[in-house]
Structure formats: C-alpha cells, structure tokens
Image (cartoon, grey):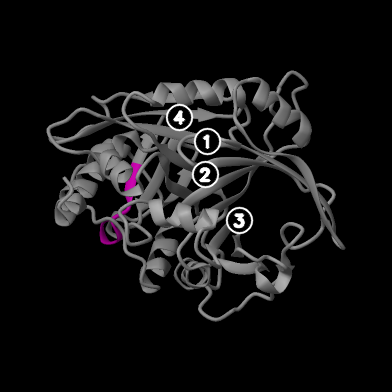
C-alpha cells in the first residue's frame, strides 16, 4: 500500500441493487447468470423494512434488496428509478480514515463510520454520496468471518440450473451516466475524493453514429482494481442511449456492470441457453474484422454466430458483448468482457455497439 495514497482501494466489495422483488431478482440471477445465493437478511433475521439476497460468482458479489412495505427508502427509490444500482461498496483497509478524507475533500456523508457485529466477528462501514442517488459504501471486513456482513445469515446454495463452471471471474468496471455538462464534475470528484486518475477520454467524435453521440471519461485507482467510466450525452440529431437512460431512470445512475470471463464463447453460449438476450450485431461488422484486429485465438464463426465484438489496443485485444436491459425499463444491463492483455474499453466497437443500441431504441420509440 502506498503510504501517500489518501484513499487506498482494495477493490469493489459488492454492488447492491434496489429492486421491485428481491426474491425474483435473486432467482433470475441464479438461473440466468449462474450466480449462487450465499446469504440472506429479512424478517427472519430482524430486518423489518427490507429483504436482501447476496449472490456470488468468482470475485463478484451482488446484493439484491427489495422493500417489505410502502414508504421505505427502498420503495421510494424503486418507484422513481425502477431496478437499479444503489450502492457500489469499496473495500478499504481503514474505514475511518477513508471516510474522513472523503468528507474533507467534499463528499457528502450518508453514513458515519460504525461497527456491525455478530457471532462471526465485526465489520466496519461508512458511506458517502456520489452521482444521483448512487452511494459508495466503505467496507472493512478484515475482522469478519461470516457469509457476508453482520445481520445476514448464510444460505446453502441451490445447485439446480447452475453451470458446470463459473461463468464470471470479477467485476471489470461500473459505468455511470450523468447529464450533459456533469461528466467533468464527477471525474474531478473521483480524482479528488478517491484519489483516482483519468485513464482515458473518449470524445463525441469518437463515440458517435449518424444520429447520436456521447462523451466518456474513465477514472481508475492506481492499481487498476477499480474502474469507473463516466458518460454524458452529446448533442446529436436524435436522442442518445444516455438520454434514454436518464429519462427512464429519472436521473443519473449506474448504466451497466462489466463482468469478466475467461471464455466468452462458452459463457455466451451458456447464457443464451439459459434465455439471456444480447444486443444483436449485424453481419457486416465481421467482414473486415480480421484486417482490423489481427490474429485472435477465437473462431470468427463463433464470434459472428454469438454477436461478440472484438477490439485491439497497444497491449492486446478484448472481446465483449452486451445484454439487453435486465428489467422493464431500458436502463441497467450487463457487459460480458474477456481481456487478452488489452486495457481499453472497446473504442473500436463503439459505433457498432451504439448503432445496435439505436436499433433497439427505435423499436421502443425512444430514438
């Protein structure tokens, strides 16, 4: 750990989504995406206003939380935003120091540092606000040995419908969408508050189609464990995917979670078998792919059949594919990504990706 780093980050501890029905969301993530349920909190554990299911796969930990009654923070959040990310929790070695530094540098505190304990030990937590109603929790679980956090009980995983192999290994990045003119404000926030640095900048000329454009900057911690692209819409002939998200999410929020895999072909085949739907890629995309990206290990026929995109940077290549929205609103979705040395975010695929998204927007009447 760098002693001069005011906010050393050990990674993303978990991502919590507030949803309309936590039991159904957990079942969906198990059956469709191969997650396993590992912990639970609800009426049976003393929670009176919400219920939460914790799901894990590889190093990815997701929490889906639903309300038990009207008028609760979860109910009000869901009524406005639909299913979406509420908390991106960051693992830190010293919650008190990290929280004090964050507040000193301009973050708005949501929860002061506090302890939670049970028979499995003690965890220390705090939280501060970021864009929209999204929250960053700070978590130190070094003295805790339970299934998740105090207040949760362990759940025996249900093996029915699970894949023979883990489909995902880690959380590669979380993308946030903010209104026009707000991107630089939040990039500066992450640089100042979390000590992150700008990794890459995509201009509206680089991220554009015939109809729409967006701008994006990626911030990352010094070790590359935590990466947050921040998007804002740019003026275009029609409404961009960011505009659509902001309208239907009713404000800024996390647009998608990127999950890593070590075999994207096998993973997408398995997800498709389970009923997961992906954005379609036109056949023309693959016509000049070998000339554009060079030699890759994967079969071009497999990539074409599954709609997988490929891009190359100075350090290698990556493969990626994007699911359809996970819920009723055209908001949050998953990206599946496999990296072969590449550290980028698929800039060469932006036009193909956004044209695919625009076709879906047109079907919804939102382009």
Distance CA(mark 2)–CA(mark 1) = 7 Å
Q: Which comes before the other along the chain, label 2 or label 4?
A: 2
Q: Which mark is residue 218?
A: 4
Viewer-side residue, 197 vs 168: 197
Report whether 53 appears left or right of 181.
right
Distance CA(mark 2)–CA(mark 4) = 12 Å
Q: Is residue 293 above or below residue 66?
A: above
Distance CA(mark 4)–CA(mark 1) = 7 Å
Q: Quadrant of residue 346?
A: top left
Are the residues flagged by discs 2 and 1 in contact, CB closer than 8 Å?
A: yes
Which is closer to the viewer, label 2 or label 3? Answer: 3
Which residue does the numbered mark 1 point to in the structure image?
A: 227
Report whether 235 appears left or right of 38.
left
Q: Which comes before the other along the chain, label 3 or label 1?
A: 3
Q: Which mark is residue 61?
A: 3
Question: Could you tell me which residue is drawn at 66 percent across and 26 percent down?
Answer: 103
Is 296 included in the stretch rendered in magenta?
Answer: no
Report whether 96 appears left or right of 306.
right
Question: Could you tell me which residue is drawn at 19 percent across and 38 percent down?
Answer: 239
Q: Please identify the residue farthest to the bottom as the structure is shown.
A: 160
Viewer-side residue, 121 vs 348: 121
Q: Which comes before the other along the chain, label 4 or label 1?
A: 4
């Amino acid at each position: 750990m760098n002693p001069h780093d005011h906010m050393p980050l050990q990674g993303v501890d978990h991502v919590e989504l507030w949803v309309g029905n936590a039991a159904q969301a957990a079942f969906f993530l198990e059956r469709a995406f191969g997650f396993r349920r590992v912990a639970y909190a609800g009426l049976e554990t003393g929670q009176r206003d919400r219920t939460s299911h914790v799901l894990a796969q590889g190093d990815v930990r997701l929490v889906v939380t639903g309300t038990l009654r009207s008028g609760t923070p979860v109910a009000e959040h869901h009524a406005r935003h639909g299913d979406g990310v509420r908390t991106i929790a960051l693992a830190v070695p010293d919650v008190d120091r990290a929280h004090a530094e964050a507040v000193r540098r301009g973050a708005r505190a949501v929860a002061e540092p506090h302890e939670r304990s049970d028979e499995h030990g003690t965890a220390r937590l705090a939280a501060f606000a970021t864009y929209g109603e999204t929250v960053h929790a700070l978590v130190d679980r070094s003295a805790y040995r339970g299934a998740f956090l105090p207040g949760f009980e362990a759940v025996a995983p249900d093996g029915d419908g699970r894949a023979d192999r883990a489909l995902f290994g880690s959380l590669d990045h979380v993308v946030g969408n903010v209104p026009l003119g707000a991107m630089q404000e939040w990039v500066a926030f992450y640089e100042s508050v979390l000590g992150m640095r700008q990794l890459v900048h995509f201009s509206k000329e680089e991220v554009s189609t015939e109809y729409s454009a967006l701008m994006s900057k990626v911030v990352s911690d010094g070790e590359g464990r935590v990466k947050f692209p921040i998007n804002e819409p740019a003026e275009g002939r029609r409404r961009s995917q960011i505009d659509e998200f902001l309208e239907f999410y009713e404000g800024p929020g996390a647009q998608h979670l990127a999950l890593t895999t070590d075999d994207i072909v096998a993973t997408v085949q398995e997800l498709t078998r389970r009923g997961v739907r992906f954005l379609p890629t036109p056949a023309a995309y693959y016509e000049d792919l070998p000339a554009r990206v060079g030699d890759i290990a994967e079969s071009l026929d497999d990539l074409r059949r599954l709609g997988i995109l490929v891009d190359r940077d100075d350090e290698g290549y990556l493969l990626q594919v994007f699911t359809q929205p996970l819920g009723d609103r055209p908001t949050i979705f998953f990206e599946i990504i496999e990296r072969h040395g590449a550290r980028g975010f698929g800039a060469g695929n932006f036009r193909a990706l956004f044209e695919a998204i625009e076709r879906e927007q047109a079907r919804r009447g939102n382009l």
